[in-house]
Image (tube, rainbow, N blue to C red):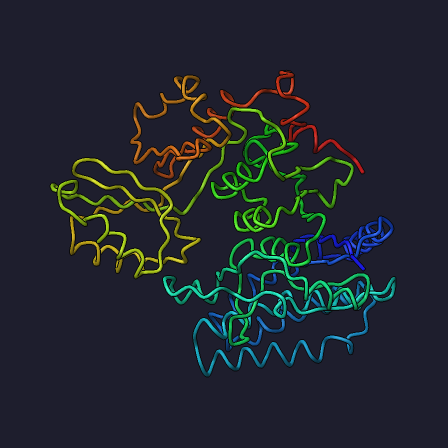
Amino acid sequence: MTHHWIVLKFGGTSVASKRQWDTIGSLAESRREEGFRVLLVCSAVAGVTDLLDALTRQPESEQLCEDILDIHRRLGQALGVDEQHWLPQAETLLRKHVNDLIHEPGYRHRAALVAMGEWMSTKMGCCYLQQRFDIAWVDAREALEAAEDHNTSAARKWLSANCHAAEAPGLASRWSALSPVLITQGFVASNNTGQTVLLGRGGSDTSAALLAGRLSAQRLEIWTDVPGLFSADPRLIKDARLLIEVDYAEALEMAASGAKVVHPRCIRAAAETSTPVTIGDLNRMSVTGTRIGKKLADVHGIKTVTCQHNMVVVLLQNLDARVQVGFLAGVFEIFRRSGISVDLVATSETTTTVAVNCASNHLGDNDLKDLCEDLGSLCKVKLFSNCVCINLVGRGVRTALSRLQNVMRYFEKRPLLMASQSANDLCLSLLIHADDHERLLKDAHTVLIPTVEDTQNETTVFGASWQQIQQVIE
């Protein structure tokens, strides 16, 4: 018998109150009525991952342990869940991982400790929803195994691991024999020895997409605190427009370029298994969100203006760069040995410019110092820290160049560290110092994105503005 699965993913702000868990339960029941088997993938309660991360740096802190447990005690009381069903085991595991980290500091025990956030939220959520319908807890680590990567750093192996996207008929069969609704952790996987690893920033989205692929799910629904992807960050630009639908390639470029609603690895995993994705706002469920799938709307032009912070730009100066055979190979061998992925590259006769995202590479000041010393054996090195990358994203980005004349006046008194056009004609990137970069972002949005009054592409790409959406009252 074929079982049709649907995966619903909920972020940390979506699992922090009884009202939200009631909404989660209603969504699960609604999808059951549509004939689906349902998998709920949940993040840690909002703020808990930050506390756990702080605990990894101060494992002797009894106060942090109590703060973490108290957040869940209060939520459990609001849910009416008997503490004996989850608290003793949660406290035992939490203190075990703390003790392991104290006696053996390192990424392995750090990952296991941080993963407790998702364990506690899903265990408690399962206890609550069991009062309402048949639901069972399953361990995501049994379904997701990290891929071995010998070219990455130890930090990334444990804290930002990768998993291959693929179908797993055996898993679908096993889980189909359980309750019709299942709940599991986001953000976590196991390595080939069964130890806990984390999937990095946006890991809950990524694990939801991977699990949807494993189950050959009909759809992945990501429920968060915004209705979907926008033409810019609505916190900065109130006129930002909701994107009704985008294809996998554009969504991936947007996510990789700083659109924080969904992680690029989530989009990549969904694309590899052709899993349709919808993004919705748990607090504004009447607002149509963003649909992501195969090429949906053949509309060219810029669809979003994004911003990536915490970038560094490295200038590598070598007078013989182009005639010195193997120079670039040597440069990128150093990046490979350091386990650092490169975002952007530009070359000239004497200079190679490289842009790197410090957050995604888990790079601190000492890591950058070591990198510059290693590169210094090949050439002169100049590092620009605290940089920002402004990205113009959309199919046929070259068509937008003629409209950027007024925007480029920004650089009359400010340096442009690097400009890069993606080979797939989906993104134009501008690397600048983090100063008044918001001005460049807003100017570009004004020039490139149609207003609500402009009906061009209205029904296929651009939806309501953030201001209009805020006025929606459930």
> In percent of the image, x 46 and y 25: which residue is there?
444
Q: Is residue 293 left or right of residue 380?
A: right
Q: Quadrant of residue 207?
A: bottom right
Q: Quadrant of residue 472?
A: top right
> In percent of the image, x 31 and y 32: which residue is there?
416
Total labels drawn: 0
Give the x, y percent position of residue 74: 74, 66
451 or 81, which is in the foreground?
451
Q: Is residue 420 above or below residue 33?
A: above
Of all residues shown, which one is farthest toward the front? 1
Q: Is residue 308 left or right of residue 113?
A: left
Q: Is residue 382 above or below residue 181?
A: above
* Quadrant showing the C terminus: top right
> In percent of the image, x 62 and y 46: which residue is there?
274
Give the x, y percent position of residue 113: 55, 72
Q: Is residue 213 left or right of residue 321?
A: right
Give the x, y percent position of residue 169: 68, 62
Give the x, y percent position of residue 227: 68, 39
* Quadrant showing the N terminus: bottom right
Q: Is residue 228 above or below residue 75?
A: above
